[in-house]
Image (cartoon, rainbow, N blue to C red):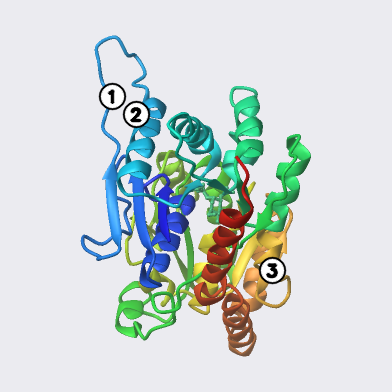
Amino acid sequence: MKIGIVCYPTYGGSGVVATEVGLGLAKRGHEVHFITYKRPVRLSPFNENVFFHEVGEADYPLFEYPPYDTALASKMVDVVKHANLDLLHVHYAIPHAAVAYMAKKILLSEGRYVPVITTLHGTDITLVGKHRTFAPVVSFSINKSDGVTAVSDYLRKETQSLFDIKKDIKVIYNFIDFDRFKKVDKDHFKKLIAPNGERILTHVSNFRKVKRVEDVIHVFKRVYEKVPSKLLLVGDGPERQNLEELCREIGLCHEIRFLGKQDAVEELLAISDLFILPSGNESFGLAALEAMACEVPVISSNVGGIPEVNIHGETGYLSEIGDVESMAKHAISILLDEEVLQRFRANALAQARRFDIKHILPQYEEYYQHILETAVY
Ligand code: GMT
């Protein structure tokens, strides 16, 4: 198949998933064309089945807001025609699903039909999408997509309850590539960070409000009082400054390291004993799955799709949003007892295996095939 993938190319779950879907499909012999404004971060410079089409900047003195959507639609039309694509797979509804609809209509006016599949990732529905600024367009463009997938059952139901959706939404979970995410021996590195055998707690995110990274610090403070430990904060984003100030206020700067954006997250997970994800909203929680694949149990909130990934009392624990006391209590119960930690580590790995890319990618292929065979225009 010849597949066009449209996504946000920056750090962040939806772009990562879109890139990995494309790369995985290319490995399986498909021709994959990424259409976006920048080379996606996980896209290596050369791969014979992978092509990258950059959406140019539509700047002009008249534009206070350069019309990216129009430039993207034009690029989609161009790539569909010249690379002879079989379908467009757009990740994150805003604005990609609406723009794809426009591209599809332009192509149809020229007698060329291309089906569009939209994958919903989470905030495109739960935070941004439902806002009245976007809701009518999101609802319309989901209904006009030929196929719609969601990354968890929670997100499927939430989309159906927030909008008047007339289409079936297929759940295709986020996935993990075990060639990359696995526990490797990085003991020398662990000794540098925790020279006295302290436990290592880790959080990885884009430091947006929705991630509640301040809760990570509050949980860590409580854990630190009972278990010698260090905290690694990986990523960057709008809350970083506030978080640094919070560390100073509670006097734990020397035990908490801000590592910024990291490409080799798996190396940090390899030395971690516990992962903390206290999000206020999370459609799936890819970061938790990456941790579990590296045998790291997860302490998380119980929102959204997280319970479909992190199993309470088995692979970690789930608590109410903001209940840092409960999160800390659970964290301590795992960290204080090596046998318990090893049991949770093994369970986390076993659960992560359910989301092996090898099981999930064929689901996308089958779905593409189904849409190609059944879509009507
Ligand atoms: O978590 C983020 O803020 C990034 C966001 C994105 O779209 O880039 O992630 C969403 O998509 C991921 C991949 O499907 C999911 O694993 C995340 O749970 C989801 N984030 C939220 O729902 C907050």
Which quadrant of the rendered structure holds the C terminus?
top right
Name which residue lies at 47% across and 28% down: 109
| Residue type (three-letter) at the residue carrying disc 3 | Tyr
Circle 2 SS class: helix
**Horizontally, is 352 left or right of 5 in the view?**
right
Q: Secondary structure at mark 3?
A: strand
Q: How many residues crowd mark 1 within 10 Å: few (<14), some (14–19), many (20+)?
A: some
Q: Where residue 272 is drawn, which disc sits there? A: none
Spatial separation of the CA atoms under disc 2 and disc 1: 6 Å
Q: How many marks?
A: 3
Amino acid, disc 1: Ala
Mark 1 within 8 Å of ligand 1, using the beta carbon: no
Q: Residues within 10 Å of mark 3 (few under 14, many from 20)?
A: many
- Residue at horizontal 56 percent and vertical 61 percent from the top: 369
Query: Looking at the rendering, in which quadrant would you find the N terminus?
Result: bottom left
Number of the front mark, 3 or 2: 2
- Mark 3 C-beta to ligand 1 under 8 Å: no
Q: Amino acid at mark 2?
A: Ala
- Given residues 220 and 286, the one toward you in this image is 286
Q: Which residue is mark 2?
A: 71
Near-viewer residue (78 or 7):
78
Q: What's the CA distance linking mark 3 and mark 2?
A: 45 Å
Q: What residue is pinned by disc 1?
A: 58
Contact check, label 2 and label 1, Cβ < 8 Å: yes
Q: Residue at x 52, y 34 (%)?
A: 101
Image x and y of residue 28, in percent? 40, 72
Residue 21: image location, x then y, percent: 45, 61
Image quadrant where residue 56 sits: top left
Which residue, given by chain and number where applicable, does mark 3 sit on? Answer: 317
Helix, strand or loop at disc 1?
loop
